[in-house]
Amino acid sequence: MPQPLKTFIIYSRQDDSYKNDLLKHLSGTLVETGHLEVWQDGEILPGEDWKEKIEQQLETADLFLVLLSIDSLNSDFIKNTELKKALERKSRIVPILVRPCFWQNHPVFAGLQGLPKNMKPVSSFSERDEAWTEVITKLHELVETIWAESESPPPTPAVPLVRPALPDMVFVKGGTFTMGSPKNEADRNDDETQHPVTLSDFAIGKYPVTQQLWQDIMGNDPSNFKGVDLPVEMVSWDDVQDFLQKLNACYPGQRYRLPTEAEWEYAARGGSQSKGFIYAGSNNLDEVGWHRNNAGSKTHPVGQKKANELGLYDMSGNVWEWCADWYDNYPSDLQTNPHGPGSGTGRVRRGGGWARYPHGCRVAYRSLWQPGIRISIVGFRLAASPP
């Protein structure tokens, strides 16, 4: 029989009673049967360093159960210590909604399948044992699946019999532009400070990378919404680095990469042909992008909307797009071919997406996520420097 999965429960002190209920149900079922080995902070002995003890458990956990409530979402310790470590280790994270809260746009939980069914809060069940039984049943299925996968031989990586077609790229003439948004732009954020940037020539993808191209290179399709001409999603920044390495191996003369944040914004604005639109190609988002109010809660085939001044499609809406940079505040002086800071807590993503309201699809809008996150609202677009 495989080894039990080492399990760590992430919760706020305000949800201690829910944690105790979960432990009670786990102890009589999945712990007893050897599926899970659950550590609880109540095992820390007097005089022990509790932070050190927790860090030790975080380093060895295979499975993280997160009790979601407004208190856990607001906890800096959970966000900056426990969740951060779970993401760094790329461990399985299972959110369990115990009290009502707005988790739907959370950078970690929005793309994860949670419990109980349909993420109905445990607190809303008239009989809580019914909720916990459903949670235990699904966890049992999860552990059995993980065990089965661990006992199966790893699949042989798919190797294309022929090289895939080169992606459509658009040449962008370099120049100097004002990055960021003016103070009078509606819905402007404080991190959009205007500053001058000079860029060299580069090329950028005409469309977001499609599932067809990802499938051709990687031999799989991780996307939630399936379709060869739909943008690929459910790919982390780290996954994209693997894709780029394999794509460049297919074409030794090419050096595909992610665009820098500055290149992305310059291209979205239309480069030297910019007409100063708020969105990529128009001041009317419906003309150029799929967003929360018109997308029907899904992605759409690339290139269906109007292109921007450079002939680029879907830079506002459809899916967020990873950029190469770590996120940081903008400098105020002239920058030449900036690449962002050398390290950080999150990678830049741009463009908004099908789940975002219009203000988040502006060409100046900035956001960040941890590089290991996979979610159905984020894809990417290729860039390349001249040979």
Image (cartoon, rainbow, N blue to C red):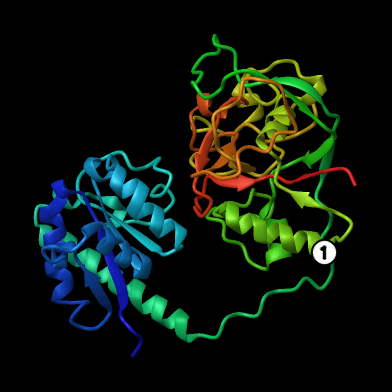
Q: Residue at x 13, y 76 (%)?
A: 28
**Total labels drawn:** 1
Eyeballing the image, is 188 above or below 289?
above
**The N terminus appears in which quarter of the rendering?**
bottom left
Q: Is label 1 in a helix, a strand or a loop?
A: helix
In this view, the residue farthest toward the top is: 184
Residue bearing mark 1: 250
Above or below, 366 against 333 in this view is below
Residue 182: horizontal and vertical position, in percent?
Answer: 59, 13
| 184 with respect to 43 (left or right) | right
List x then y, in percent, for residue 175. Answer: 82, 24
Q: Nearer the viewer, residue 287 or 222?
A: 222
Q: Nearer the viewer, residue 247 or 57?
A: 57
**Which quadrant of the figure has residue 221?**
bottom right
Occupied quadrant, residue 156: bottom right
Q: Is residue 251 left or right of residue 205?
A: right
Whole-percent x, y for residue 91 in the image: 42, 64
Residue 3 as seen in the image, left or right of residue 49: right
Residue at point 84%, 54% (across, down): 166
